[in-house]
Image (cartoon, grey):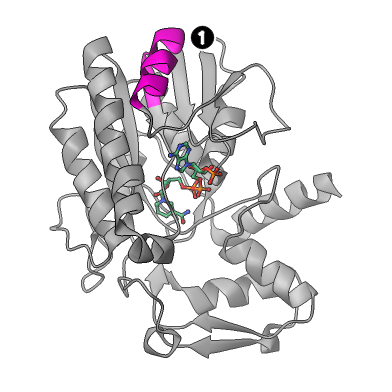
Amino acid sequence: MNILITGANGLLGQKLVLRLCTEANVVLFATGRGPCRIRSATGFTYLEADLLDKSTLERLFEEVRPDCVIHTAAMTDVDACERDPAACQLNNTDCVRLLTELCNANGTHFIHLSTDFVFDGRNGPYREEDPIGPLSEYARSKAAAEEVVREAGIPWTIIRTMIIYGVTDDQQRSNVVLWTKRSLEEGKDIRVISDQYRGPTLAEDLANACATAALNTVTGLFHVSGREVLSILEIAQRTARFFNLDEHHISPVTTEELAQAAKRPLRTGFIISKAEQELNYQPHSLEEGLEIVRSQLKGRQ
Ligand SMILES: NC(=O)c1ccc[n+]([C@@H]2O[C@H](COP(=O)([O-])OP(=O)(O)OC[C@H]3O[C@@H](n4cnc5c(N)ncnc54)[C@H](OP(=O)(O)O)[C@@H]3O)[C@@H](O)[C@H]2O)c1
């Protein structure tokens, strides 16, 4: 089975490459913008490509002939999306249209990554069938992409997830766990949002769910996140405690006080029973996930 992972240099992309590169019956291709930043995996072919260019994508499909595409690439900086809606639409919606058209022509299974931000955050935790209510450019672009995928006439899987954490080879992007740990280690005082609630998701757990969907062609819409719904402040405090760092350097800030460019849903969280049943999804607890982060960081020193 030929599998193509997009966004291979990103957090989920890197974990997916690691997860799938040892699968016996998989020929793995990974595509990303610029040179490959994955160092800890072998046994895959990396192809540099900008996904906004139609002829590049056509060549990519000709070369790879994928049975399955796992599309993790996206413009993920929510505030940058708010400031540049045109780029957001191109990267998060139009790109999905191009990819699904090619999947349609090739009979390819398309696995799309989406977000808890499609909800308005008034009634979390959410089930798959709950009505959406996107609040930002990013959220609207991802909601529109979901619609494109559903209408594409191909075997599809949409995996919505939230607040992913984990360690990548290049450490180019941070996440709430790494940012908290690093800031406190450097003795900085940090302000963390106290009134937004999410289920922190270990990147390896999410990669496992995507891999199961790919290897077994499990289709449909799935909610995949950590089991516990916590305020972002609590996530930071538990991270501090886990790494024996001084949590007194963390102070709460409200969404209103922070006044970020893009509006965020206050309380999301997912009901994950469908993923547990159909994708054999068994997420680690936050502390188990932090233990994995610790051992990976240790291996890198
Ligand atoms: N991270 C979260 O907390 C979170 C929460 C909910 C949903 N999601 C969704 O989950 C998916 C994976 O997230 P992630 O955290 O792994 O994202 P990430 O670390 O930001 O990685 C995204 C990757 O996509 C690449 N990319 C963006 N536009 C591209 C283009 N036009 N052509 C080629 N590559 C492009 C980026 O390239 P560069 O490295 O060159 O920028 C980056 O490597 C995304 O679809 C995201 O919307 C993430």
Task: Examine the structure image and report whether residue 272 is included in the region drawn in magenta.
Answer: no
From this view, report whether residue 40 is shown above or below residue 225.
above
Residue at (31% x, 66% y) in the render: 268
Q: Is mark 1 within 8 Å of ligand 1?
A: no
Kind of residue indicated by mark 1: Asn
Residue at (45% x, 11% y) in the render: 64
Where does residue 132 sit, x and y in percent of width and height? 17, 58
Q: Is residue 98 left or right of residue 199?
A: left
Q: Which residue is mark 1?
A: 25
From this view, report whether residue 141 is shown above or below residue 121.
above
Residue 275 image-quadrant placement: top left
Element carrying mark 1:
loop
Query: Which is nearer the eye, 239 or 162?
Result: 162
Where does residue 53 sit, x and y in percent of width and height? 38, 29
Residue 218: tell me if it is visible: no
Where does residue 39 sit, x and y in percent of width and height? 73, 32
Where does residue 63 sit, x and y in percent of width and height? 46, 9
